[in-house]
Image: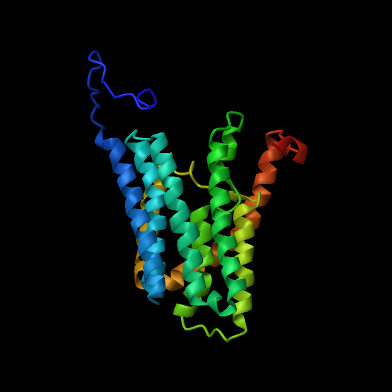
């Protein structure tokens, strides 16, 4: 029996490992991601307590932090594989689980099992969309111009537009009992858009160079937009959600034009199959 469990004897020649300190420029973006994750988890708790307004605002702030953590990492040259994986996991909680549970607590629970199934579909659609996004990052053959477009609706946009019924509820729009079915159908449409291959504008490559004569107008537009969001948050969120849904067809048309200009062709289903 002694041979089965030999005593552990450390090698005297082994030297203790010395871990190098991690630069703060790598830690800072991950701290922003963790703050967004805390907001997403807090939104779930608030939804269980019936506090839907702060729950929705927590998801909105998490979406704002998600939009800046990657840019902060690139600005500080602190991008890392750990940060990318942490960002994806946080996005699944913030934009998949949190909105699904908020909508279930708000209205879909009235449909019992059917409402819960739709909530599961919404959350899983976000998970599949994030997995596909991570897989596409490792594609070396992807043309540079395609970075101007997302494949399907991005996760933050899907979460914010998916909560449109809540914005309308906060604006005192009446929701009779039969409207729960409409909310269910709307959430299914958003879930399908998230996992679809419909190209949408990304905006990640915009703004690298701004013409000098547009600097002051951009400042004014940002200030006005910030004031509107602070003063009329749910009106602004409802308008932005409806506007984004209306812009999706224009993004698809523009993508087709760019594809023809570049002389490329869409891959056939046989080529994309694993």
Percent position of residue 247, x then y: 60, 58
| Drawn side of residue 204 relative to residue 184, left or right | left
Percent position of residue 224, x then y: 37, 63
Whether residue 230 can be seen here: yes
Residue located at (53% from left, 40% from top): 134
Whether residue 209 can be seen here: no
Percent position of residue 184, x then y: 61, 72
Percent position of residue 93, x then y: 44, 56
Quadrant, the N terminus? top left
Q: Using the image as rendered, state which of residue 172 and residue 88 is in the foreground.
A: 88
Residue located at (40% from left, 46% from top): 213
Residue 136 versus residue 181 in the image, above or below? above
Snapshot quadrant of residue 259: top right
Q: Using the image as rendered, state which of residue 263 and residue 274 is in the foreground.
A: 274
Q: Using the image as rendered, state which of residue 219 and residue 98 is in the foreground.
A: 98
Looking at the image, the residue that sits furthest to the top is 13
Q: Using the image as rendered, state which of residue 156 and residue 252 is in the foreground.
A: 156
* Colour convention of the picture: rainbow
Residue 136 versus residue 199 in the image, above or below? above
Snapshot quadrant of residue 111: bottom right
Residue 240 versus residue 77 in the image, above or below? below
Residue located at (62% from left, 53% from top): 195
């Amino acid at each position: 029996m002694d041979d089965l469990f030999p005593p552990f004897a450390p090698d005297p020649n082994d030297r203790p490992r010395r871990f190098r300190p991690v630069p703060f420029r790598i830690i800072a973006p991950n701290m922003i991601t963790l703050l967004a994750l805390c907001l997403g988890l807090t939104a779930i708790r608030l939804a269980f307590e019936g506090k839907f307004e702060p729950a929705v605002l927590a998801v909105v702030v998490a979406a704002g932090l998600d939009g800046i953590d990657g840019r902060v990492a690139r600005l500080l040259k602190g991008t890392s594989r750990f940060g990318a994986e942490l960002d994806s996991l946080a996005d699944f909680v913030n934009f998949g689980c949190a909105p699904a549970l908020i909508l279930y607590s708000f209205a879909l629970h009235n449909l019992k099992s059917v409402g819960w199934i739709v909530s599961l579909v919404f959350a899983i659609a976000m998970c599949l969309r994030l997995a596909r996004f991570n897989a596409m990052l490792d594609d070396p053959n992807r043309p540079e111009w395609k970075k101007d477009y997302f494949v399907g609706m991005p996760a933050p946009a899907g979460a914010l537009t998916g909560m449109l019924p809540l914005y309308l509820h906060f604006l005192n729009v009446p929701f009779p009992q039969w409207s729960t079915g409409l909310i269910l159908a709307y959430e299914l449409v958003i879930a399908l858009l998230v996992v679809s291959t419909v190209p949408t504008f990304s905006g990640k490559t915009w703004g690298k160079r701004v013409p000098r004569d547009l600097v002051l107008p951009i400042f004014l537009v940002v200030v006005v937009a910030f004031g509107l969001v602070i003063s009329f948050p749910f009106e602004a969120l409802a308008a932005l959600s409806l506007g984004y849904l209306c812009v999706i067809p224009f993004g698809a048309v523009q993508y087709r034009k760019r594809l023809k200009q570049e002389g490329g062709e869409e891959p056939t289903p046989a080529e994309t199959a694993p």
